[in-house]
Amino acid sequence: MTVILEVNTAVWLDELSRRHGRPVTLGDVPGEVWDRLARPGLDSVWLMGVWERSPAGREIALRDPGLMASFHEALPDVIDADIAGSPYCVRDYVVDAALGGPEGLAAARAQLAARGIRLILDHVPNHVAPDHPWLTSDPDRLLRGTADDLARAPADHIEAGGGIYARGRDPHFPPWPDVVQLNAFSDALREATVATLVSIGDQADGVRCDMAMLMMNDIFGKTWGERAGTTPAEDFWPYVIPRVRARHPDLLLVAEAYWDLEHALQQQGFDHCYDKRLYDRLLHGDAGSVRAHLDADPSYQRGLVRFLENHDEPRAAATLPGDRGRAAAVTVATLPGATLWHEGQFEGRRVRPPVFLRRRPQEPVDEPLRDFYDRLLPAAASVRRGDWRPLTPAGPPDNDTHRHLLAWTWTHADARHLVVVNDSDGPAQARLPLPWDDLRGRPCRATDLLTGAVYDRDGDELSDCGLFAALDAWGCHVLRW
């Protein structure tokens, strides 16, 4: 199953350059650094932000009081040289020369491939930078405006490339100040998107598509109304994805997706979509809400991306500290589907730098947390094989703490595993009905892959009553039977 590590490329290379006392680009990262990055339990690295960033977008950011305040909050000693511009304000889909250019990326891909790791890169389908070549060469790919539009709503429009265009937006928020909106209904844009993704597929093994749901016909039409023109008969991604797969049939396609549109995007061709609902329930819900989410069809579950943080969300060490964060990590790591980890998460970083920055503050390493992740990732890789089955914890009427437990099994021809997580701040006990019908008359031994603890149990009792589990607050077991 897919396990991705997201790396903020500019920040990572900046820190390597400072550590080694020389400029380090993608083409000359030391081999031992790749060895550390390609840790056991990972199979993919997402190098976030490798494309040419926009000088025009950077200038807009430097003039934006809200953005500048966020930079100072994350990095109090920030200077202009630390502000690289947004990696989602793409000037062109060419690897930024400051990061090593196309040759550096090819070398990085080869280093990852030698370690059995796939390379994933970004694509931003909804918008481009105000100095992107398309504004002058192919303006019909963008959402154009008029002088009256600019005068009436200057925050919604931008004058660039000799024309007036709508600024890119998510319909639930004000427009982004530094980007120009593409027109998902434009035939020319759809053809160009295919070409762009094919080009990315020439350089990588997977693509993470930013805000993919914004390009769906229904969403785009509701966002832009008549300005978008006539709605095409075919939706955006069903047009684009088959044409890309004709050139790159094995290209992994991951959608950043929200608003309960994950299943629709899976049906439209994406391999995996963000599971924001699980993230929200782990932060703000209870075990019952998580369990209800996991009742969905297994094929849908396998197409989700489980995560506790990424470059858009706060650091997990800040929102889910201590044992609560460990319990949540065991949860996302051992469920079906893809898992997304974020560079710095394993070390307990608490500051999420805005993506505009190439430098982040120094923070101490949480050594116990890093040791925990060093055990969890390979354990999860060994667990997630075969048939996954959620369990329903049971308990006596006078003890309802069983409702705080999450539990599931993985059954393979040569392995059986049980995961139990106490998703609460108090002790919990339950009986767990195991799905294995050959336990009777046999001694059974369970080994916890996180702690090494060994538990011997009677097969008859397991068959008749289920496994009795008692866990302290935020406790968890990853048991190999």
Image: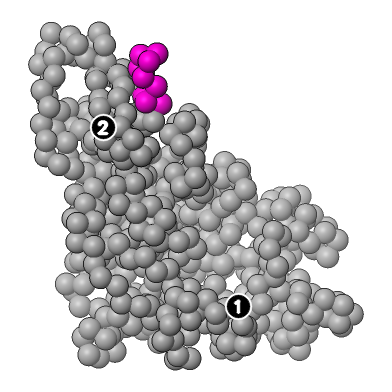
Expressed as whole percent of the image width and height from the top left, the position of residue 220 reads 73, 57
Local packing at callout 1 (Cα closer than 10 Å; few below 14, some 14-19, many 20+) is few
Q: Residue furthest right?
A: 148
Residue corresponding to mark 1: 66
Secondary structure, mark 2, is: strand
* Left-right relation of 251 to 431: right
Q: Residue at x 55, y 62 (%)?
A: 210
The three-letter amino acid code for the residue at tag 1 is Gly
Residue corresponding to mark 2: 471
Task: Decide whether the magenta segment is chiefly helix, strand or loop.
Answer: loop
The three-letter amino acid code for the residue at tag 2 is Leu
Of residues 473 and 105, the one drawn nearer to the viewer in this rendering: 473
Label 2 or label 1, whichever comes before in sequence order = 1
In the image, the segment drawn in magenta is 394-403
* Left-right relation of 152 to 174: right
* Left-right relation of 297 to 105: right
Expressed as whole percent of the image width and height from the top left, the position of residue 206 reads 42, 59
Q: Quadrant of residue 153?
A: bottom right
Q: Is residue 76 magenta?
A: no
Q: Residue at x 32, y 29 (%)?
A: 428
